[in-house]
Structure formats: C-alpha cells, structure tokens
Image (spheres, helix red, strand yellow):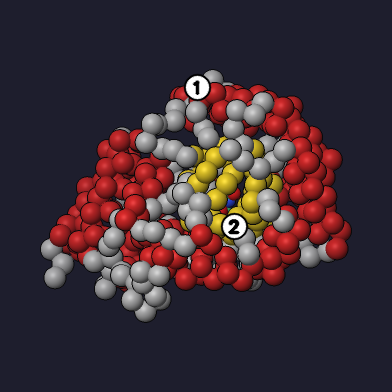
Amino acid sequence: MAQPCDIAIPDVFGPIQIGSLEIAHPFVQAALSGYTDLAMRRIARMHGAAYCVNEVVLDKSVLHDGPWQRKLLTVEPDDHPVGAQLMGGDPTTFGPAADKMVTAGYDVIDINFGCPAPKAQNRCRGGFLLSEPETASAIVRNVVDAVRGRCPVTLKMRRGLNDSPESERNFFEILDLAYSLGVAAVTVHGRSVEQRYRGPSNWDFLAKVKRHAGSRTVLGSGDLFAAYDCIRMMEQTGVDGVTIARGSMGNPWIFNQCLQLASGKADVNSLEAPTIQQQRNTIIRHFKETARLHGKEKAGKLMGKFGVRYASHHPKRKRVREAFSRGSSTEQFLEVIRIWYDEFT
Ligand SMILES: Cc1cc2nc3c(=O)[nH]c(=O)nc-3n(C[C@H](O)[C@H](O)[C@H](O)COP(=O)(O)O)c2cc1C
C-alpha cells in the first residue's frame, strides 16, 4: 500500500483547521473508550490517521493523584496531534482537569457531550448535558478560561437527547454558545442519546449543522464503516472532516484507503485490501505497542477484542475470530498469530 505521505489530495479533502491547529487531512481517529490508547493511536497514525483523540476520561480521574493520572498526563513525542477528551458533570472540576491536560502536552481539549451510557446519564454527564444548556455552557466557559488559548477547545456532541423539537433547540443553543465562547470545532454524531446505537446516524442533521456553522469546522460521525462511507459523508453533508470510530477497530487500513480514494489513486473497486502478511505485521506491531504500554503479561488479553476485529480481513474470518475470542493469555494470542498468520497459506 502507498504510504500516506506519498499522496497528494485535492483541496476538498485537504488540511482542516481546528483553531490554530492544522490537521493534514480530514480523516481522524475517533475517541473510543477502551480502545484508543497510545497503542491504537500509534497504529492509526502509522496507517495514515491525521489526528487521534484519546478515549474519554473523567475530569475527576485527571485530578486524582495516582498511577492512572500519571499515565493520562504522559504524552509521547510521536503522539501528535492528539486530543484529550474529558467528561464530567460538575463545571468546577472540568477547568482544572483541562488545565492539567494542556500542561501535559495534549494539542486539543475535547468536551464530551455525547456519551449515552446509562452510568453517564445517571450521573448527569456526557449526552445528558445536551438537555442542560446552562450546565453545558458553564462547563465550556470554565474549560475555555482554564485553557487560556494554549490550545483549541472542541466539543463532541450527539444530535440531541432524543427526537423532540426541544432537544434540537437545546443542541443549537449549546452549539451557538460554545462558538461564541471560542470553541474551535465540533464533532457531531448523528444519533440521539436515547437512540444509542439503534438505527442509522442522521446525516441530514450533519448537513444542517454544517450549514448553520458556516465556515467553522464541523467533523461528522456515525456509520463510517468503510473508506467510501467517509468520502460519501463529506460529499453529502459538507462536513469538513470525519472521525472514524467502529470502522477503525481492527481496521487501521481504512485511513490509507480514505487517502487513496480522496486522491483519486484508487476507486472503490480498486482499493487494496491488506494481505495476510500486512495483517500479521500490523497485529504484531499493535501487540508490541500494547505490551510496551501495559506489560507483556496483560497484552494478550487486552488484544483479544482487537483480534476479533482484525479477523474480519482474514479469508477464514469465522475461525480466526473464534480462535481470538477463546484466548485470554499472551501465549494463546501469539499461538493464534502463529497458526493463522505465520503458517497460513
Ligand atoms: C466501543 C466504543 C467506544 C466509544 N468511546 C467513545 C469515547 O470515548 N468518546 C466519544 O466521544 N465517543 C465514543 N464512541 C462513539 C464514537 O466515537 C462514534 O461517535 C460512534 O461510534 C458513531 O460512529 P460509528 O457509527 O462510525 O461507529 C465510542 C463508540 C464505541 C463503539
């Protein structure tokens, strides 16, 4: 596969601006809780992702001394540009947490107003805040004040709490307030909080947001499972870029494929799928990065959820998937690689 840096892409898929930060192209690694740790971000960048967002973290965990905090506040030199995504329900703790993340070296502070998990709803966090414009605005104001222009502040939003007109009014009220407070860009997932993952992401809503936002940067999210979906979302809705979520799990090749399509080097029919050897190299690299981050003992278990996703590229996908899902140790994980990737002909 061609390397991302070899590829010239037309203006429409060219660099995007997030405040003062220029992102090389519009294909972004979305925040994925339990997935987009440093290891997955490195793999995404290696395959062409222009910008990666860390998994969501609670503002309170950033403020709580301990090993987890130290991990969160370590940003590696090869992990840029990287966004820190924060979630919480109390405006007063958001600001100090954002301050720590910027000081640690994150390039963007992204505020989560989208998480639909019942736990987040019960604790008045994430997507719940789409129904609370006043609290949401207080959070944005505190974060913008704490960051003091050192990096851009962005929002991640779902299209609303539900399908009611009030929900849509709240969405645009929060969006307008956020822009007026200096928020540089928003990512919008076209599902409602109540919808969770049922039914399609509403791309018409994304088009409406982009028309409303004018020249301000809007990134789209929802139902981006293949490179062609990313191009189609940009063309159909006018959003400036896309954040690739489930479509990137066990499929980092999607970034390079987006670049191939955007540059006209390939069309949907001529896109290169990864060979078994390429799959193996990527999985092993991902495993090694995970081992560096979390220790070799834990790496095999942690890689299981990625393995079942990577398996979808293998000619014997069902059997490989089963093999990955049965393993729970590093030895078992490496045995699956040996049988299904090293020795497979
Ligand atoms: C396992 C999983 C974890 C997620 N974690 C986060 C997160 O930490 N922060 C966030 O803003 N969105 C998170 N999302 C939402 C995605 O970023 C994205 O908006 C959503 O999956 C819709 O895109 P898709 O339909 O292309 O997957 C998560 C989604 C999944 C499936």
User: Quarter-wise, where is residue 166 in the image?
Assistant: bottom right
Mark 2 CB lies closer than 8 A to ligand 1: no
Give the percent coordinates (x, y) of residue 150: 60, 28
Q: Amino acid at mark 1?
A: Gly
The kind of secondary structure element at disc 1 is loop
Q: Position of residue 65 (x, y in %)?
A: 54, 20
Question: In the depicted view, which residue is nearer to us: 31 or 314?
Answer: 31
Image side of residue 114 versus residue 224, left or right:
right
Locate residue 293 relative to residue 92 in the image: left or right. Answer: left
Q: Quadrant of ligand 1?
A: bottom right
Task: State left or right for residue 218 relative to residue 277.
Answer: right
Other-residue count near label 2 (Cα within 10 Å), few / some / many at <14 / 14–19 / ≥20: many
* Image point (57%, 65%), residue name: 234
> Which residue in the protein does label 2 denote?
240
Q: Quadrant of residue 272?
A: bottom left
For mark 1, does the 10 Å Cα neighbourhood hold few (<14), some (14 to 19), or many (20 or more) residues?
Answer: few
Amino acid beneath label 2: Asp
At a point 68% along the width and 37% down the height, the residue shown is 88
Sequence-wise, which precedes: disc 1 or disc 2?
Answer: 1
Cβ of mark 1 under 8 A from ligand 1: no
Q: Which mark is residue 141?
A: none
Residue 303 position in % (x across, y down)? 34, 50
Outermost residue to the bottom: 269
* Any part of residue 42 in sight: yes
Res 297 → quadrant? top left
- State the residue position of label 1: 66
